[in-house]
Amino acid sequence: MRSLWMRWPGWFRSQPIDGHAITCRQVVSLVTSYLDGELTRSEHELFEAHLAECEGCTEHLHQIKVTVALTGQLRDEDLEPQVREELMGLYRRWSRDSHA
């Protein structure tokens, strides 16, 4: 699966799309709450309005849904130790960088 960066260079907007008050960065940060049904009505409307105008964020949401569906089927023993360590390393780097 090709990344969003390859398919839509520059898709990650730091400014709202014309007519919408939500950025790609905000959509990415709200994806989990959106999928869990935790957004307020107005947040949900802003989120969906952005998706209607942004192919990159729509694809990102799709990829998250697929990831959630697939990882829900993985068991610890399904991963080889090296793969597990690589994934944990990626998670640790992401966690460290996102909280810096």
Image: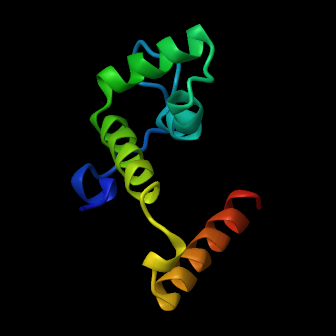
Give the quarter of the image for residue 40.
top right
Q: Is residue 4 left or right of residue 27?
A: left
Which residue is pictured at 50% across the width and 90% down the height?
A: 82
Nearer the observer, 96 or 23? 96
Which residue is pictured at 60% across the width and 76% down the height?
A: 88
Q: How many marks?
A: 0
81 lies above or below 32: below
Nearer the observer, 63 or 14? 63
47 lies above or below 84: above
Whether residue 26 is visible, yes or no, is no
Whether residue 52 is visible, yes or no, is yes
Nearer the observer, 13 or 93? 93
Q: Is residue 21 left or right of residue 57?
A: right
Determine the residue located farthest toward the bottom in the rendered image. 82
Q: Is residue 39 left or right of residue 62?
A: right
Quadrant where the C terminus lies?
A: bottom right
Determine the residue located farthest toward the top in the rendered image. 41
Q: Is residue 84 left or right of residue 3?
A: right
How is this picture coloured? rainbow
Give the quarter of the image for residue 73.
bottom left
Determine the residue located farthest toward the right in the rendered image. 100
4 lies above or below 47: below
Which residue is pictured at 26% across the width and 59% down the height?
A: 6
Which residue is pictured at 44% across the width and 49% down the height?
A: 68
Where residue 64 appears, as percent x and y from the top left, is 42, 47
Where residue 63 appears, as percent x and y from the top left, is 35, 48
Give the quarter of the image for residue 62.
top left
Quadrant where the N terminus lies?
A: bottom left
Where residue 34 appears, as percent x and y from the top left, is 53, 28
